[in-house]
Image: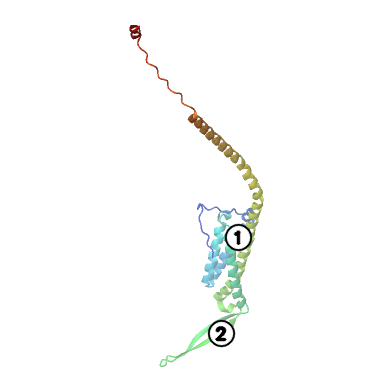
């Protein structure tokens, strides 16, 4: 059995539910939910506890998918529920076919017990009754009704899962066919200005680096002018004395 996991706001992206499923299929899913509840009640009345438990889990899954306008419905959940319902329907159908000709009941009675030897004799009696027999009481007929309804409900659930799942596949293929060419063109158009801008920026940065390197090389190769030293001159008074 598949149990839906995850809670709203868990960060997982959910696939959109097709509009036709939300608008047209939802009412049939609610009818299935009611059928599952009725089948579970009949199974409980017939004391078929395990069958009632399985049907109750199926009803919970259907309710979980339908709440909030089919918000939790997904293709994988539909596929798993459909497979499990189909398998359960096959098992129930096999049991039903073996009972349609009449139900066999086994009664075992102890007829003799020897205290000295400890031996016991039992008498086993088999009775055949029609599938529905008023003389057997309410419990017997409720069990027969539960056996009759269970495969019908399970096959109905499997068929409805297949029906809704097909719309998920159709919408997914349509979205891919529509989005593939348009998305490619849009991404190319959006990426073109960005690529051109990045190329222009890279070219301008390269030109600036080349110019800076050229200036640095030119500054390094230019000769440095020699520094001239001033010759010492004698004071005027000394020049006159020597004359």
Mark 1 vs mark 2: give the one in front.
1
Q: Quadrant for the C terminus, please.
A: top left
Mark 2: few/some/many CA within 10 Å (<14, 14-19, 20+): few
Lower position in the chain sequence, tag 1 or tag 2: 1
Q: Which mark is residue 42?
A: none
Front position in the image: 224 or 82 = 224
Reading the image, the residue beneath label 2 is: 126
Relative to residue 175, is residue 32 depicted above or below?
below
Percent position of residue 118, x then y: 42, 90
* 11 with respect to 190 (left or right): left
Relative to residue 168, is residue 215 depicted above or below?
above
The answer for how far apart the CA atoms under marks 1 and 2 are is 43 Å
| Callout 1 secondary element | helix
Front position in the image: 209 or 202 = 209
Reading the image, the residue beneath label 1 is: 29
Q: Residue at x 65, y 55 (%)?
A: 173
Q: Does residue 176 appear in this view?
A: yes
């Amino acid at each position: 059995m598949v149990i839906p996991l995850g809670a709203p706001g868990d960060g997982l992206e959910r696939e959109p539910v097709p509009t036709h499923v939300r608008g047209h299929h939802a009412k049939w899913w609610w009818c299935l939910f009611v059928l599952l509840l009725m089948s579970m009640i009949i199974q409980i009345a017939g004391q078929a506890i395990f069958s009632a438990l399985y049907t109750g889990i199926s009803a919970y899954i259907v309710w979980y998918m339908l709440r909030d306008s089919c918000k939790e419905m997904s293709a994988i959940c539909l596929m798993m529920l459909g497979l499990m319902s189909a398998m359960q329907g096959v098992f129930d159908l096999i049991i039903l076919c073996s009972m349609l000709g009449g139900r066999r009941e086994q009664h075992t009675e102890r007829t003799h017990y020897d205290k000295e030897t400890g031996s016991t004799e039992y008498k086993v009696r088999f009775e055949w009754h029609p599938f529905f027999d008023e003389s057997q009481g309410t419990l017997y007929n409720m069990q027969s009704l539960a056996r009759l309804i269970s495969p019908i409900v399970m096959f109905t659930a499997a068929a409805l899962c297949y029906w809704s799942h097909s719309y998920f596949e159709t919408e997914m293929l349509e979205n891919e066919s529509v989005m593939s060419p348009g998305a490619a063109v849009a991404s190319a158009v959006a990426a073109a200005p960005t690529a051109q801008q990045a190329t222009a920026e890279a070219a301008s940065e390269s030109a600036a680096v080349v110019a800076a390197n050229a200036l640095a090389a030119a500054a390094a190769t230019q000769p440095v002018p020699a520094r001239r030293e001033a010759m010492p001159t004698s004071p005027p008074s000394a020049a006159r004395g020597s004359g």
